[in-house]
Amino acid sequence: MEILNSVSLSSVGVGRTRINKAVKVGSQPQRIGWKLTRTCCEYSPDTYRRQAKYEQQPQNVDLPELQPKNKKKPFPVPIKKMLQDSRRDKRLAQMQIEKPLEAPKNGLLVPELVPVAYEVLDNWKVLIRGLSQLLNNVTVYGCRKCRQVHVGPVGHQIQDCYGSGSQHRNSHHSWARGSINDVLIPIESYHLFDPFGRRVKHETRFDYDRIPAIVELCIQAGIDLPQYPSRRRTSPVRMIGKKVISRGEFVDEPKPHRSEDCVSLLAELDTFSNQQGRSPSPSNVKDLAERTLKAYLNVRRGVEQLMSKYTVKACGYCSEVHVGPWGHNVKLCGAFKHQWRDGKHGWQDAVIDEVIPPNYVWHVSDPSGPPLRSSLRSFYGKAPAVVELCVQAGAAIPDEYRPMMRTDIVVPDCLAHEPRTHGNNPDCLKVKKDGLCNMYDVHTTLFNGHS
């Protein structure tokens, strides 16, 4: 019997494995061995250089996917790490050892984050005031049947409406004039005088005020507002496992101080009091758009910095957000399988997009051009509604949103217009199939000598 040896390839990193196997040759079984060669290739330095350059300045990124309504949101913290922390806390609780808590987990303030909270609140005021004024110059539309929002002079014609009666409209949207709440989605939370005190129950939910979650986060981070007082602890909270052994005495919440200054301050912090038409038109739209966009980026950056220390909970099924060490017990969740939970929320750690929803909209590169169409949706990009509104008002596109907006992709002119006839020759008609021009017919007619 003739045995063939395997061919070895000379390259960087070659590993060989010897394998013996008994086979039947003729009438006698024999053991035959052969070698398997594993080859590892190396990239050239130019490849690594190009990859690093692409990571620094990506050309375009994928558009954000819509979360399915029949599934729970993914955990921001890996489950394996959560189980490890739970086992460690349980082991300490069995040995009657207190859980080591650092500020602000123990109820004390973080002095380094107090200026950040004031900066976030100031930028939040600038953001709301700027958006309410820019809405007098830039038109915003909202669909009557779904949550789709469009920023532009006219509504787009992309057929992606899945609201009620969409099958009768061929998935076209039913546009109506929008407001600031369509651009900056309001996310509210219960204001707590003592986040480590009594939980909000379903029966006592009307005893607590609902304010923007960003304002509540800034209050717990060190901002003092007369309208919404907050308890400042001097001694830390002590816990063994999940049980609080020392939180101090329960203090009755003082009555809020109401004055004209407080009312005017609250009007600056809420989007419902800054509707379209109530704010005067700006004199310099471009400068206002630049300030508003800068305030939006600063708010997101500051809130993300505060959330790295202060606990913010979000429901894994709906859009409810709660600022505090643990969630409330209000039974108002109507999302997926809420009957199994008796209407209670499924609390988990929140992310920045749940506190400040980006509310992605289609990017309109040319507001004076034709409306967006379904056949060209692969050429369009997306951006948060606030960013798109400020860009159309004259602000420069931020570098972090440029890849998602796909500014380097040019929409083909032959796809953007309706089919037309070239000259008087009927054979030169561009046939349009699914929004794409049949260029084969055009090239055929040009080759045959037609003009």
Image: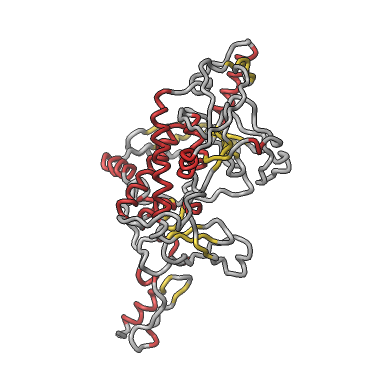
Above or below, 150 against 249 in this view is below
Residue 74: horizontal and vertical position, in percent? Answer: 56, 39
Which residue is painted at 60% across and 20% down in the image?
A: 87
Residue pushed farthest front? 260
Q: Is residue 78 left or right of residue 337?
A: left
Q: Is residue 264 visible?
A: yes
Q: Nearer the viewer, residue 445 or 419?
A: 419
Q: Is residue 1 left or right of residue 427?
A: right
Above or below, 447 against 225 in this view is below
The tally of labels here is: 0
Identify the image quadrant of the C terminus.
bottom left
Q: Is residue 64 left or right of residue 123?
A: right
Q: Nearer the viewer, residue 11 or 339?
A: 339
Which residue is painted at 26% across and 42% down in the image?
A: 46
Above or below, 7 against 430 in this view is above
Quadrant of the image occupied by residue 369: bottom left
Above or below, 220 against 157 in this view is above
Residue 98: horizontal and vertical position, in percent? Answer: 58, 13
Which residue is painted at 37% across and 55% down in the image?
A: 406
Q: Is residue 31 visible?
A: no
Residue pushed farthest left? 46
Residue 410: horizontal and vertical position, in percent? Answer: 34, 62
Q: Nearer the viewer, residue 57 or 433?
A: 57
Residue 57: horizontal and vertical position, in percent? Answer: 31, 45
Q: Nearer the viewer, residue 68 or 169?
A: 169
Which residue is painted at 42% across and 28% down in the image?
A: 114
> What colour scheme does the image use?
secondary structure
